[in-house]
Amino acid sequence: MIAPRFGFTKHFQKERNTEPYCRLRKMFCGFKDQARARLLMDFPGSYVPIPLVQSYRSLRSVTHGLSILMYHQVGAFAPMREHRSTYCDVRRFAAQMAWLHRFGYSVLRLDDALDALAGRRPLPPRAVVITFDDGYENFYTHAWPVLERHGFPATVYLIAGMLGQPSHWFAADGRDTPPLMGPERIRELHRAGVDFGSHSVTHAKLTEIDHVAARQEIEDSKAMLEDVLGAPVRHFCYPFGRHDRAIVELARAAGYASGTTCVRATAQIGWDALALPRKAVSYGDSALGMAYKLHFKHAPKPRPGEVWGPRPGGL
Ligand SMILES: [Zn+2]
């Protein structure tokens, strides 16, 4: 008989009694076979032992649909209490991507995922799309090398009127204002295979400005970014997630193939591509925390008026 070996590291001791871990432990191990299989997962400075599976296959059946992960900044940051959903420590990011790789998630280009949601190709199991809002230079320095190592595609949403500038909107609440990528960097990454979408011209809350101004933000940013890239810009991301039915229809009319929101859910076949839900990965999320969000966190938590789900009138 194999004796259980649980040399929990300091990090893991903190995590082992958290709700995500308990639920995953229950799902994978059934408490009886903890020693049967274990995976040592690389984690910065320590190891997170993930007691695996008698029933590894159960992972395959847990989630149906498409999970779109939402990141903002990736880098090394001082611990924070607020705005955690817009920062990701680069070591945790590396662990999260390693998780996706090791467990065989299907990390798709957004265009391929849209084809699957529209029923034009099969949606693979554990389908994931990785997105980054705002287009920080730290995408290039910290996130891209990790993505490249795993061969994972990603979509980065750019603020068309602020390329190469500091992210000045953070100044209002006393945060750092890291630089956004400039045109040269964007073209370099585009050549390397990164997909770019629009995140408006000025990062405006589109539901809080008038209809004409919102249309300009949506349409002009598309044209501006197409000039920079010399290629079509097919995807839009609503700044701050602010959208409603009217804004979604503006994005559709402007010719975008997709629009991503901050509504939390796993997108299903037949859902409206112009109002796609996402899962925000937060500063506090380990690889395990990210997996928990992928598989269990489905409560949408929309603001009033926000829309998602099946497209009105069908596909
Ligand atoms: Zn943004």
Image: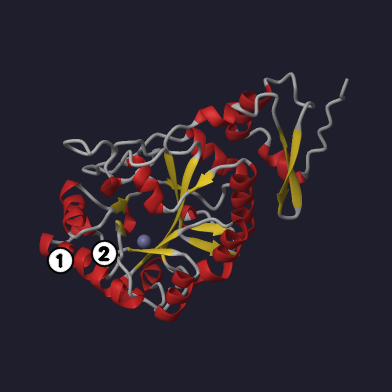
- The quarter of the image that holds ligand 1 is bottom left
The mark found on residue 204 in the picture is 2
* Amino acid at circle 1: Ala
Gap between marks 1 and 2 measured at Cα? 10 Å
Residue 213 percent location from the top left of the image: 15, 66
Q: Secondary structure at mark 1?
A: helix
Corner quadrant of residue 91: bottom right
User: Residue drawn 62% across and 40% down?
Assistant: 103
Q: Is mark 1 within 8 Å of ligand 1?
A: no
Local packing at callout 1 (Cα closer than 10 Å; few below 14, some 14-19, many 20+) is few
Query: Which mark sits nearer the N-terminus, 1 or 2?
Result: 2
Q: Secondary structure at mark 2?
A: loop
Instruction: Give above or below for 183 relative to 217.
Output: below
* Amino acid at circle 2: Ala
Q: How many marks?
A: 2
- Callout 1 touching callout 2 (CB < 8 Å): yes
Q: Residue furthest front?
A: 121
User: Residue drawn 51% across and 50% down?
Assistant: 282
Q: Is mark 2 within 8 Å of ligand 1?
A: no
The mark found on residue 213 in the picture is 1
User: Residue drawn 74% across and 18% down?
Assistant: 32
Figure quadrant of the C terminus: top left
